[in-house]
Amino acid sequence: MIKIEEVTKKYPGMERPAVDKLSLNIEEGEICVFVGPSGCGKTTTLKMINLIIEPSGGKIFVNGENILEQNANELRKKIGYVIQKTGLFPHYSVFDNIAVVPNLLGWEEERVEKRVVELLKMMNLDPDENRNKFPKALSGGQSQRVGVARAMAADPPVMLMDEPFGAVDPITRNQLQNEFLKLQQKVKKTICFVTHDIDEAIKMGDKIAILDQGKLVQYDTPENILFNPANEFVEEFVGSDRSLKVLNLLRVTTVMRKNIKRIKEKAGIDEINKYFSHPEKNRILIENDENHVVGYLAKEEYHKISTAKGWNKAIRIFPTSLNKHNTLKDAMSDMLQHNIAALPVMDEEDKFMGIVSFRDIQSYIGEAYEENENEKELDENEVL
Amino acid sequence: MGVERLFVIIQEQGISLIQRHLYLVFVSLFFAIIIALPIGILVTRPPFNRKINQILSFLNTAQGVPSLAVVAIFLPLMGVGVRPAIFALSIYALLPIARNTVAAIKGLDPDVLEAAKGMGLSKKEVLLKVELPLATPIIVAGIQTATIFTVGTATIAHLIGAGGLGRLIFTGIAMNSPEFILAGSLMAAAIAITLDQLLGLFQRRVKRKFGG
Ligand SMILES: Nc1ncnc2c1ncn2[C@@H]1O[C@H](COP(=O)(O)OP(=O)(O)OP(=O)(O)O)[C@@H](O)[C@H]1O
Ligand SMILES: [Mg+2]
C-alpha cells in the first residue's frame, strides 16, 4: 500500500542525510511503527509521505501511485494526518474541526453531520456534549481523540500519525492506545505511526521499523524485534528488560486456558470430593446460577475448612476480570494488585472465555525465549 | 480662564471641527488598513518571510519618527490641504497595523499551520480560513493603536491647512488663550477615548469568536 524506495532527505547545511536510502513496504491494513532515538529521521520520513517535506531522492508510492507526480493538496486529502500537539484549529468548534476535510471535499451538509457524529461516538466522545466545544475547553486526551477523528473524517485509506499519544499522561495514553487498536480492527487503515517509545511501538505495531541516523536498522514484526534483534543497536534500544516487553506484546488469549472444570456455588461436597480425589486436580472454578464464573476453589483451602461451616467459605472470589484485548502485562498487573494467582477472561457480553494464571505466563515466556517459538498447547491441568 | 467661555467655544465650533477631525481620522485609517493588511500578509509569505525580523524592527523604528516630522516631510512634496494631511496620517497609521499583522501571523502556532497543510488546504485556504481569522484579534489591536495615534496626530493637520481640532489648539497658542487649547484637547481626548473603548469592545468580541 505504501512503498518507500531508496528515499533520501538531506537538509541544506547538514552533513549527513536526515533520512538515508530508506526502503520499505507497508502492507494494506497494517500499522507500521517508526521508532528510534531522537533525531533519527522518523518525522522526516513521515512528512515525506504526505509531501510536507520533499524528498531529495528516491520514490514513494501510495496505492501504486508515485506521490511526486501528484498534486500535493489532493494527495493530502486522501491521507489522514495526526500530530502530537494535535494542531486543532482554535477558532473552530470540535464539529468544525472534524469537518474540515469533508467540507474541502464538498460533502453535503447532512453527510458531514452524520459522519462527524459517527466519529465522535467512535472516539468515545459524547456528540451532544462535545460538538460545540472549542479546543481549549478539551482535555489532552479529548484533544487527541478529536485529532484522530479529524484525520479519519473523510475515511482516508492511509493515516500518518506522529507521536499521536505523546503529549498525554501514561494512563490516558494507555487508554487511547487500546481504543485505537480496537478501532483499527474495524477500520483496517494502513498506518505509519511514529514514536520514540519502544513499548508503544511493540504494542501498536504490526511491523516495527527501527531507524538510526536516518538508516533502517531492522524492519520486522514486534516478536522478531524482541526475540531476534538484528544487531546490538536494536538489542540496546529494545532494552535489557526484553522479556518484560514481551508481556506488553502478547494478549491474554495466547496463554488462556479454555476448557476448565466448573461447578455451581451450590454444588454438593460429593461432587467436589470426587474431583479433588484425582491427585493432579487441585483447582476448580466456581460459577453462580447464571453460569457466571465468580471464583475458584483450591484443594488445600477446601480441606482446611470444616464441612460444617460450608465449603463456600474457601472460595476465592475473582476481584476483577480481563478481556481478550488485555496484554499479559495488564493481566500480571491486575494479579499483583489483587494478590491473586489467576484471573478469568470475559468476552464483550461478560461471558467466561477462559482463565489466565501467573504460572502459565511465567512458563510461556521462559519457553518462548528458550525455543523462540510462540505456539503451545495448554491443557487443563494445574492451571490456577 | 472662564469655564463659560470654554463652553461657548465648544458649542460654537465643536460640531464642525469634530466632524472634520473624524473625517481626517477615518479616511486615513481606511487607507491605512487597506494598504497595511496586504503588506503585512505579503511580508509573511516567501521570499519576504526570510527577512521578517528585519521588517518588523523597521516597522517599529519607523513608528518612532515624530508625527510632526512625517507631516513636515510631505509638505514640500504635496503642498497644503486635506489631501496631503490624509496622506501623511495614513502612512503614520499603517505602521502599527502592518506591524501587528506581521507579528500576529508570525506568532501563530506552527502545529496548527502544519495540520492545515497536512489536511490538504491550499495556501489560499490556509490564509483565509486559518491565518487571518486567528490573527484578527491582534490586527484589530493594531487598528486600535493606529486610531489613537491618528486622533492625536490629526491635530497637527491644521498646520498644513486641513482643519480639525488642531485649529482650536493652535489658535489658542497663538492668542495665548487657554480656553481654546483646552477645548481642542478635551474634544480630541474625548474622541480618542470613545474610539478606543469601542474598538476594545470589538476586539474582545472577535477574540472570543475566534476562541482566543
Ligand atoms: N527543517 C529542518 N532543517 C534542517 N534540519 C532538520 C530539519 N528538520 C529536521 N532536521 C534534522 O534532521 C534530523 C532528523 O529529524 P527528525 O525530525 O526527522 O527526527 P525524529 O526522528 O522525528 O526525532 P524526534 O524523536 O526528536 O522527533 C535531525 O538531526 C534534525 O535536526
Ligand atoms: Mg519527530
Image: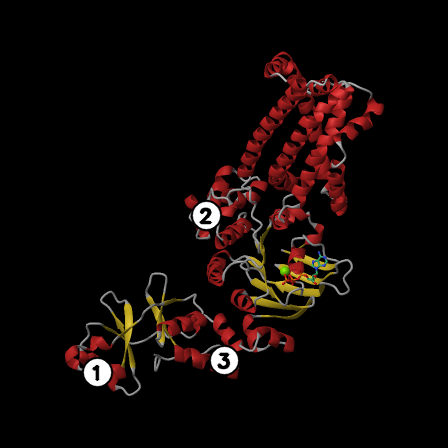
Q: Is the residue marked by circle 3 packed among few (<14), some (14-19), or many (20+) residues within 10 Å?
A: some
Residue A110 vertical placement versus A58 (above, below): above
Where does the image place residue B62, in percent across and percent down from the top left?
A: 76, 37
State which tag comes first along the sequence, 3 or 1.
1
Number of marks: 3
Per the image, the residue denoted by label 3 is A368
Q: Nearer the viewer, residue B22 or A323?
A: B22
Image quarter of residue A288? bottom left
Q: Is the residue marked by circle 2 packed among few (<14), some (14-19), or many (20+) residues within 10 Å?
A: some
Between marks 3 and 1, how big is the CA–CA gap?
Answer: 36 Å
Question: Left of A57 or right of it: where is B142?
Answer: left
Q: Nearer the viewer, residue A291 or B130?
A: B130
Where disc 2 sits, the SS reads helix
Residue A3 in view (yes/no):
yes
State which tag comes first along the sequence, 3 or 2.
2
Give ligand 1's quarter of the image. Answer: bottom right
